Image: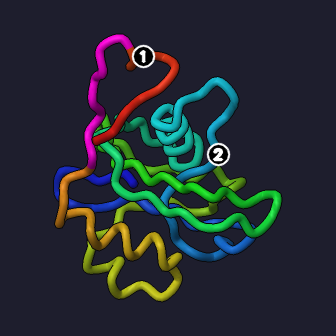
Amino acid sequence: MVVATDGRILLVRGTYGPQRGRWHFPGGRVEPGELAPEAARREVREEAGIDAEVVGLAAVRHRLELGPHLTPIYLIFRLRPRDEAQSPCPDGDECDAARWFTPGEIAAMTDILPITRAVALRAGQQPPLGEVEVPGQSGEAWTLFA
């Protein structure tokens, strides 16, 4: 979830599966050898053309696995754009539109994934969990958010 300093939130409109025609946060799977925060930055850049930095962990969803392509743990990181003047540009493959929305616009939307609305509307109410440096542990192999 990319949040600008004025509170606007970046969403993309999906082109396939349950996201088809619905707005949601840019996101995707973690690639082998990649930490989850790196994956969040990469997915935002790939899907919306925005260079952003991770601020912290905004939400975690856990569910029982329902199939081979579903992820039981879903992490939603909070990011901020490095350049707020940069306009979103959808990748044209996984999403056909990308734009900034105010929380009020998100609250009124009907074509949005429910989890996206729930997390987006809490964005201004609580700070994200921040990355914590653990001596002798933190680094390229793992990260802690607390």
- What residue would you read off at disc 2? 29
Q: In this view, does 77 lie to the left or right of 105?
A: right
Q: Is residue 10 left or right of residue 70?
A: left
Q: What residue type is labelled 1?
A: Gly
Q: Position of residue 124 (x, y in %)?
A: 19, 64
- Residue 93's mark? none
Q: Position of residue 21 (x, y in %)?
A: 63, 76
Q: Which residue is drawn at 48% across and 88% down?
A: 110
Q: What residue type is labelled 2?
A: Arg
- First to last magenta residue range: 129-136
Q: Which of 131 and 98 is in front in this view?
A: 131
- What residue would you read off at disc 1? 139
Prevailing secondary structure class for the magenta stretch in the rendered image: loop
Residue 4 in the magenta stretch? The answer is: no
Q: Which of 34 and 11 is in front in this view?
A: 34
Asked if the residue at tag 1 contacts the one at tag 2, i.e. Cβ–Cβ closer than 8 Å, the answer is no
Q: Is residue 112 above or below residue 135?
A: below
Q: In the figure, residue 53 lies in which quadrant?
A: top left
Q: Is residue 50 above or below residue 135?
A: below
Q: Position of residue 37 (x, y in %)?
A: 46, 36
Q: Which residue is drawn at 48% across and 17% down?
A: 140
Q: Is residue 143 above or below residue 70?
A: above
